[in-house]
Amino acid sequence: MTMEINNVKIEAVKGDIANQPDIQAVVNAANAELRIGGGVAGCIHRAAGTGLESECRKYAPINPGEAVITGAHELPNDYVIHCLGPVYGVDEPSDKLLAACYKNSIKLAEEYKLESIAFPAISTGAFRFPIEPATDIALAEIKDQCQNTSHLKLIRFVLFSQKDLDIYQRKLKER
């Protein structure tokens, strides 16, 4: 299932966020220290090699909703955009902080004149944000940001589980 807004194709696929060779920037659901961790951060850091963590040191720590951009190192992409999603029930207002992750990532993509970006389901793993409202927030913010993009042509959501993919595809269809 895909959708198009202002000439930007938005799609959801099941896959590995660290293996998106046709995408210029992948988004890391980072921890505040921008270090290797579990989930998406661990996957991206392991695939990118030790140079990514070294480059990240100068940007850490970051706050919930904040995004920074680095090179992709050994990943097949040009850049990694790191954003810290909110811990559900801890970082408040969690909905606005989660929306800021998507907004700030899109702003960086536009600033760097990128044509493609891939997002994971930010904050829905270890940070416990429920997938349904997280998906609504992500899609609403992406829709808003696409109204003002001039470079982006493709936004891909890369979901790890079939359940998450099914939710994204259903919600894309509803929009």
Image (tube, rainbow, N blue to C red):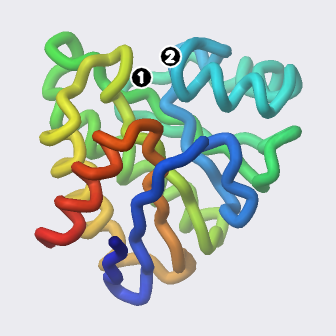
Q: Position of residue 170 (x, y in %)?
A: 19, 60
The quadrant of the rendering that contains the N terminus is bottom left
Please say if 147 is above or below 106: below
Q: Position of residue 16 (x, y in %)?
A: 60, 42
Left or right: 16 in relation to 140: right
Q: Residues within 10 Å of mark 1 (few under 14, many from 20)?
A: some
Q: Position of residue 8 (x, y in %)?
A: 43, 80
Left or right: 13 in relation to 4: right
**Which of 98 and 39 lies nearest the eye of the viewer?**
39
**Which of 135 and 12 lies nearest the eye of the viewer?**
12
Amino acid residing under circle 2: Ala
Left or right: 24 in relation to 163: right
Q: Residue at horizontal 72%, vertical 41%?
A: 70
Q: Secondary structure at mark 2?
A: loop
The quadrant of the rendering that contains the C terminus is bottom left
In this view of the protein, can residue 69 be seen by the observer?
A: no
Q: Position of residue 62 (x, y in %)?
A: 50, 22
Query: Residue 121 falls in which quadrant of the image?
Result: top left
Q: Residue at horizontal 61%, vertical 49%?
A: 26
Amino acid residing under circle 1: Asn
In this view of the protein, can residue 37 be seen by the observer?
A: yes
Q: Residue at horizontal 87%, vertical 39%?
A: 74
- Residue with the most extreme front position: 162
Q: Secondary structure at mark 1?
A: loop
Q: Can you tell which of label 1 and label 2 is closer to the viewer? A: 2
Residue bearing the label numbered 2:
32
Residue bearing the label numbered 1:
63
Question: Is there CB contact under 8 Å for labels 1 and 2?
Answer: yes
Q: Residue at horizontal 59%, vertical 68%?
A: 116
